[in-house]
Amino acid sequence: MKFSSIYKIPLLLFFFITLAVSGQIKNPVKFKFTINELGDNQYEAVLNATMESGWHIYSKDIPEDTGIPTDYKVSGKNIELIGKFTEVGKKHEEFSEAFGGKIIFYSNTAGFKQKFKLKDGTKPGDVVAEITYQTCDDRVCLAPNTLEFNKQVTPKGTTEEAVTTEPAKDSVKSPVATETITETSAKAENTANETAKLDPKQLKISTIDFKKPLTDCGTAAVEASENYWTYLFLGFIGGLIALLTPCVFPMIPLTVSFFTKGMKDKAKGKRDALLYGFFILLIFVLLSIPFHIIDGIAGNIFNEISTSVWLNIVFFIIFIFFAGSFFGYYDITLPSSIANKSSKAEEAGGIIGIFFMALTLVIVSFSCTGPILGSLLGSAVTGSSNVPMLLTFALAGFGLAWAIVFGLLALFPQALQSLPKSGGWMNTVKVVLGFIELALALKFLSKADLVSKTFLIKRELFIAIWIVIAIGLALYLFGLIRFPHDDKKPKISWTRKIIGILGIGFVIYLIQGLVPAERPKLQLLSGILPPLNVSYFHNEKDGILGMKPEHDFFTAIELAKKENKPILIDFTGYGCENCRKMEEFVWSEPDILPILQNDVVLASLYVDDKEELPEDQKTKIDLGDGQVKKVKTIGDRWSLFQQVNFNNNSQPHYVLITPDGKVINTPVSGYMPKEDFKKFLECGVNYFKQNK
């Protein structure tokens, strides 16, 4: 049974996932807020928008079920509105095929005005203006954004123009916008920080200066960098596996023979074949470009994806969907019209024709390569701080595997005779991949469980499900269970038997994880399994490795003062794989754990905690350019706390500070060898002991 239309599900999900959840760091719209006096105790709150070339925002009068209309609200103390807000500027109207109707928008400039009066004409009024809008260009729409502007108006006359908005009440100014603060306001803010640094609403701590640590020891443990070559290798392995699937393998001899036998000039045929391999590599690399564009216009979007409960559930569903395709219950195919257009373009001949031959191969093989590429996407998006570059390397590795195989076979066509014949073994490869997709799907469901703090999928349950999947794989390889496209009487080759035995060995390896132990086990799966304290044998509230970390920085400060110990700030996350690896296989070492237990106050701050803050602790932070970020959840607080104080948003990130809030030595990030982390800890702890 073929579900050719179902291809839209994974494609559209992946596309809209990357667009729908954006923390917009780059904003193509700039706002200027002014208040004009109209006389007779009447005023006008004016918000003027300036858009970069090619971008637009919608009018408030846009028809329903099209774009998102702009909404402008004005409120405040001693304020009474007069009528509704009006728009100023040149409206553009055009028919949108996407919406099936007319849309109305503004380009370049737009203005929004709201008249009001002071209820008491002898007293000043505090004006709060809020605009909700969506920005689009011809390629992409950014997620809807809400900005807030504050200004005080007095009965005396027109107030000064606010080029950069003032922070809303209870908000703090981020270092990324410090160039917009006047010297006077900066001094005032520093004074406020000194007196209110233990206020949970005060995210910027004035004493913290990570660029000027108290000592320069321990700097050998530098920030870990992304291992791009690992993803290149993983992509390469994925490409080789994809070559063995029934969508691709039969094309190898046909394609290579076309270049080596169908040409009168054999040398030209081989050159064209090598060019064909190069274009395959190029096409796969080009597939990563949209992620770089999205990352540029919506920074931090991939971090939002990796910590989103619902999006991890979506990934879980997608991987289950992929598994069903590999098992043979349906096919995921692109529309035949796309392949037909690409195939027709091959008639152009020359270099252009060869390019479209490569493109056709990529398109028609999507049924098998789509799930594999989707796995690479899911792995990078949910486990990295530099998703676009990792995807580029992974896709380059994938394309490189194909380019090498097609290129080498074109140079040495006699090697085609040594290739195995097409047969049932190719379906076996697909089914094995289906079992792998099932195992990977559970990882995303587990991450959603951790981030939501439901803790339903305990470590032992996760391992038990993987054991069932591994047993199912072994039974399939031994021919005891079959899937739709398997032969009725499959021949069990030695290869299947060997892989089946390895599957049984993996089951035995997993079983040891079901037995309670003092030291962590299953090191190969560290970061994939739920944390040690999410277990039927432990309570997640009992801490980890015999420790009960503080989860609030301000509480940790008070405890550190009381015990006269330095604070180890551990910026972590429920969905952070490298954090789990550090906890299980570095923190647990006998020469590391006593330091953590006895010599520091451990503050583990979860940047992806979705629990809402109490109302009296919610606040706002001014990110500059008129953007005010609302701090609603615990994760919001610690994520912004990390950014404004340490200019870093990666996890794990470790900082040692004194009880009075001074950074002791250079902070470190990422998974690192035990010796590096030990040097970092001993450096800071010894310095603190010597300078109490």
Image (cartoon, grey):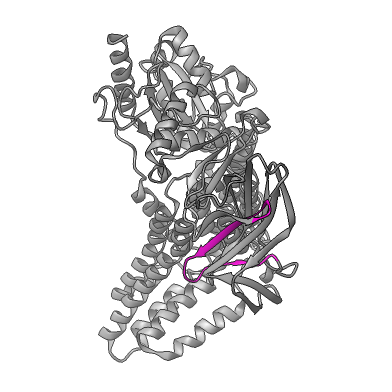
Does residue 362 appear left or right of residue 447 in this picture?
A: left
- Report the quarter where the N terminus lies: bottom right
105 over 169 or under it: above or below = below
Asked if residue 42 is positioned above or below residue 201 in the image, the reply reads below
Residue 351, x across and y down, in percent: 35, 84
User: Is residue 494 visible in the rendered structure shown here?
Assistant: no
User: x and y percent of residue 157 in the render?
Assistant: 57, 50
Q: Quadrant of the C terminus?
A: top left
Whether residue 92 sits left or right of residue 349 in the image: it is right
Q: Main secondary structure of the magenta part?
A: strand
Q: Position of residue 616 (x, y in %)?
A: 65, 28
Considering depth in this image, is 425 or 146 the residue closer to the camera?
A: 146
Is residue 578 something one can see in this rendering? yes
**Total numbered labels:** 0
- Which residue is found at the position 43% from the left and 55% from the top? 388
Membership of 538 in magenta stretch: no
Q: Report the side of 453 relative to 543 (left or right).
A: right
Judge from the rendering whether residue 62 lies leftward or rightward of residue 368; answer left or right: right
What residue is rendered at 29% in x and 13% in y? 686
Indicate whether residue 54 is drawn in magenta: yes
Q: Nearer the viewer, residue 254 or 55?
A: 55
- Vertical side of 251 occupied by 322: above or below: above
Residue 292 at what x, y percent from top left?
43, 59
Residues drawn in magenta: 39-60
Identify the residue at horizontal 34%, vertical 20% (top origin): 681
